Amino acid sequence: MALILRHRRHSFIYGIVPDLIERVKKYLEEVNSFSSTDALTIEEFRVSYSGKKGILNTLFAAFREVPIEQKKAFGQELNVLKNAVSEKIKELQSQLKNIGGKSSISDPTRTPFPIQTGNRHPLSVVKNRIIDIFSQIGFTISEGPEIEDDWHNFTALNLPEHHPARDMQDTFFIQTDPDILLRTHTSSVQVRYMEKNKPPIRTISPGRVFRNEAISSRSHCIFHQIEGLYIAKDVSFSDLKQTLKYFTESLFGNSKIRLRPSYFPFTEPSAEVDIYWGLETEVDYRITKGTGWLEIMGCGMVDPNVLKNCGIDPDEYSGFAFGMGIERIAMLIYQISDIRLFFENDIRFLKQFKGTL
């Protein structure tokens, strides 16, 4: 008598019942030896044996074709297999519950490890704070190319060829005749803005700049600047001072400022801006060299020659400009002693600013 046993993954032909019993015993060995802690694998095992089209239902269907004299032996073996499958499923599900495996069934797309969220770089945090402060008093944002020509980076800013003031900045030249270079300041953005827009002008220019300097704890060949420009009728030095006072109080709190005479080729008169940092700690003594005052930016009234070069009548309009290094401001706010830390992408350093907006 030939019996045909069909399963979705199995198709067996048994010539006699003893062969069918041997097959049941082999299934029993597989069940007893099966072990897993993976929820999906356990579920596949359960469906394979106890599902609607599983092995057990297929074997019970074949049981009906077994001769009466052989039903007892085959039925006993089949019941042993059925009980073993039931106990094995209970055992595996219990173990899975103890190790928290149920969550992988409820959400198979869940990542195996928690996702680490990032945070803003401290330079971006400080830059955004500065932009926000000046935006509140009507300054717009202007941007320009990092690769500049000689006119916008030097000549238009009252720095003609062979002018000694060019030696103040060590430049990365890409080519000569004509000179193409990496911009040494974001003042070049202000020149482009004045060429395209008529006064009144009120803009700030944040961006990355480049200078051929030795890298140390206090200087770097790449850094970031924010420069501001205000051009209108009857702009005075007192307007500049009040604008800077508003900025320093917004960023540092109620701090005193002082303006020291200085020199920049594109402003006249020019000044350096210091804030009173105090002398409360040893660090304060070190960074202020014992004076309590810290230099934070340069400023001045826009030189009439710069206005002429940009197509603005200096007899009708005047203005002021200022500029600061974002790294320097960030080092003051966060008490960072080495500028190189901003560029090393060390997660141990950057994660200290997690949660900072």
Image (tube, grey):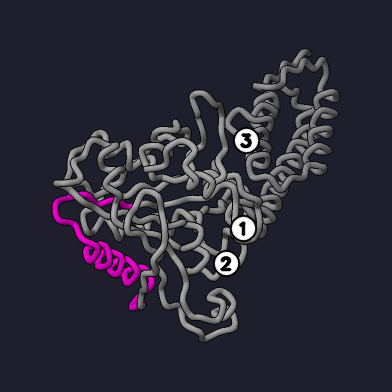
Q: Where is 10 relative to 217, above or below?
A: above
Among the 4 quarters of the image, the one containing residue 272:
bottom left
User: What residue is pinned by disc 1?
Assistant: 341
User: What residue is pinned by disc 2?
Assistant: 336
The crowd level at tag 2 (other Cα within 10 Å; few <14, some 14-19, many 20+) is: some
Q: Which residues are magenta?
A: 228-255
Q: Where is 218 relative to 187, above or below?
A: below
Percent of width and height locating residue 36: 74, 45
- Residue at horizontal 37%, vertical 42%? 157
Going from N to C along the chain, the mark reached first, 2 or 1, is 2
User: What residue is pinned by disc 3?
Assistant: 47
Going from N to C along the chain, the mark reached first, 2 or 3, is 3
Q: Is residue 327 left or right of residue 50?
A: left
Q: Are marks 2 and 1 in contact (CB under 8 Å)?
A: yes
Among the 4 quarters of the image, the one containing residue 23:
top right
What amino acid is labelled 3 in the image? Val
Q: Is residue 70 left or right of residue 350?
A: right
Label at residue 129 = none
